[in-house]
Image (cartoon, rainbow, N blue to C red):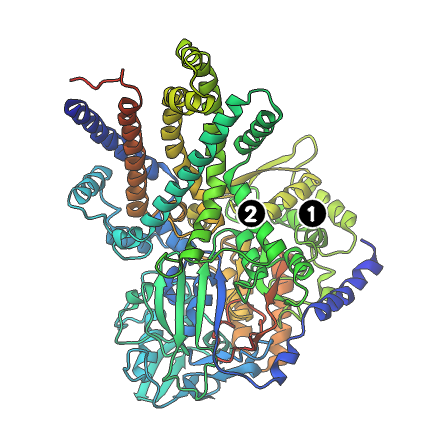
Amino acid sequence: MKTYLAQRLTIAVLTLLGMSMVIFALLRLAPGDIVDILFSTAGYVSPSEKQAIMKELGIDRPYWVQYLDWLRQIGTGDLGKSYRYDVPAWQIVRPLLPVTLELAALSMVFAVLFGVPTGVVSAVRQDSTLDYVLRVFSLAGLSMPAFWLGMVIILGLVTWFRWIPPLTYVSPMEDLKLHAVQFLLPALAVGYRSSALIMRITRSSLLEVLREDYIRTARAKGQSGRVVVWRHALKNAMLPVVTVIGIEFAFLIGGLVVTETVFNLPGVARFLVQAILWRDYPIVQNLVMFIAIVVILSNLLVDMLYGVLDPRVRYGG
Amino acid sequence: MTRARIAALPASFALFTLTLASPATTEAQTPKSGGVLNMMLREDLAQGFAIHETATISTVWPAMPCFNNLVLFDPLKKTESVDTVVGELAEKWSWQDNFRNLVFFLRKGVKWHDGQPFTAKDVKFTFDMLREAADAPAKLRINPRKDWYANVEAIEAPDPSTVVFRLKKPQPSLLLMLASGYTPVYAAHVPPASYRTGCVGTGPFKLKEWRKGEFVELVRNPDYFVKGRPYLEGLKYFPIVERGTRQAALQAGKLDVSFPGETTKTAAEQLKAAVPQLVVTPYNQNVSDNIIMNVKKPPFDNPKVRLAVSHAIDRRALVRAVHQGGAVVGASLAPKPWGFWGLAEKDLLGLPGYATNPADEKARARQLMAEAGYSPEKPLRVEIVTRAIAVYVDMASFVINELKQIGIDASLKQIETAQWHAMATRGDYQIGANLTGIGPDDPDANFYENYACGSPRNYSQYCSEEVMKLIDAQSQELDPKRRLAMVYAIQRRLEADAARPILDWKLDYFTVWPHVKNLIPHQSIYNFGRMQDVWTDK
């Protein structure tokens, strides 16, 4: 187990190194830089002044020097300085992290809590009216982009209740109820799509398991339907579901970009878009690296869970 | 559109205005102190509070309450002219030596937000920095309005409460440029770069907190030099990137005020339908849609081709189709009543592209194209560039369709914001669909910036010695009537030369909740954000 973990972590570090190169290169390939944006807010460009600002920000140096400098900064825990705000990047990024992590976690919790039970019900009641209703509901979830659903929620709230969630982050210490509302609505918008996928996978996986011999044996031994489904069948049907949850979590982070924007939540994802538009390299590079780390860790967690769910899976040296 | 319908336009527009706006009633009530105004931003502050380093309303609107100018356009009056300029840090001012010297007598006892006293030294520091005087003690990283002060020869501070602007030649417009929201006085004891992250001003509100990307909070300045002002306890600005969310927040009452330049006619009508008590005031954004053609490069180095383009575009159809009536036609300055200096509708009729019969204009355009050597068999193929933002692209798409009708086969190339100004300044294009915003509604601010030979914002690179002489002459003209006539003549000339054909002037439908009082939009979005006299009846 330890050896496997060490291997996976080594691969993760190499993946992150590769990611850092891709992020760095892609940002430089994008047309324009922060200085162009600064001048665009002034409506003109002066080549000599532009050169002076590039020098001030250190983006006149060769790319490889800038890249190594960034790696060195990461190594020392220094994320550099935001070009746009002229303050340390960490100072900006730090308050954004909990917002995105909480929203992502809530969305995933909602997706699992809704997706798995409905998937089970749908499988157990295969081809019943309830099954059809749930399948249509899940299909709708897969077809609906999160940002559209988010906007519909906002417009619905303002039209019917003349109310929308708070425009700034409300801490749970400040007002727990408002905090919950602020996060539940976007979590619902993002989690709906994921729950639909989880529901469909749970359903198909469970249907397959329910036809296995050992399930028939359990039933023949007189065990109740509930025990057969929830104790024996579901555990064995969960392997593909857990895989999908892992993939969805990574996918969900991307979905947060628009949802945070629509709900005006001050999270990493929304800020990332703004930072990209401003070519604020230190912010973008470090935020994308953060997302990459979250994705890699969630995949690692999923792999670890396989062993818990299926005793046949063993992590050897 | 028939002549009768065109004639009916101003009347129907006036009716719409009356239906929507009733700002006059706000001034009659007795102001109340207290309360916080919640306002939207469409993006986070572009360059912090460094107004002098930007040319965007995204900075000016939230930063203006922190500062004061020497003079300012009266916040309570819609019109911006010499007659509506009031003193801020200057108690009074006087033109001397036949408009060669502008002397300001400063208020005494004014303090910066950090407690330091304000003196003439701060004024000299600010304007020496802006005009990039040889002995200026500080330099701005980006200085977009250096040209405004090209005529200032020296600034003297003979004593702590007197400042003299010595000019190379008379320039009555200087006072108007000093009255713009773009012209605050910076503190000499604070590095100019620090305004990108904070704000030490003398203004009615002090910066309390700027949580990046989340909100900007300003609180009442208890030491403000105008006793009893500001009325409000604070201001809170929320950057909301998504337009739909901004509108929903205003509709829900989470925000009290729309963002200047943000609300189209259609959006205002939707808001009014949803919340009838909202107060909507149409006013001039002082932003024009225009066509930039690189006069240094073929085929637009040929005046006939430029003129053909100008003749081809039906301005009134553009106003109807793209702006749903939320704009007005005009030449290089906004027409009355939206602006002061622009040519009236009747004066535009003889100019390229302004005739009431678009078919005649198109026929003239085709004739010019033929004279330039183009025909249906040999069409002119060009790439029309525009900024990759909806308001630009919508206008460019309309223009492309118009140009097709005179044998110009134009394809659209969208340029990212990051590259747009660099490309335009370099002249690295043939033809472009552009938007131009002007700080104060003033000929000098506009002509020197957008039409003067060598100006970095003269994207067309149009340069006429004759026009430059006319621009200089109007700038020095002391008689207001004669100056207005000269400005009219310059506008006619610029349109006749197709220097930068103006297509329309965009209107904004500024929307506030009825409890917001004394927040009166001006003839330009850039000049009414001080908030000193604004109060709330909530």
Give the amino acid at mark 1. Answer: Ala
User: Is residue B498 in view?
Assistant: no
Q: Position of residue B75 (x, y in %)?
A: 53, 78
Q: Secondary structure at mark 1?
A: helix
Q: What label does residue A153 carry, if any?
A: 2
A9 relative to B476, above or below: above
B265 relative to A289, above or below: below
Residue that numbered label 1 is attached to: B312
Q: Position of residue B505 (x, y in %)?
A: 62, 60
| Drawn side of residue B374 relative to residue A176, left or right | right
Q: Are marks 2 and 1 in contact (CB under 8 Å)?
A: no
Query: Of residues A200 and A225, which is closer to you in this image?
Result: A225
Give the amino acid at mark 2. Answer: Ile
Query: Of residues A37 and B456, which is closer to you in this image?
Result: A37
| Drawn side of residue B338 relative to residue B120, left or right | right
At x 31%, y 63%, the residue is B197
Q: Position of residue B528 (x, y in %)?
A: 52, 72
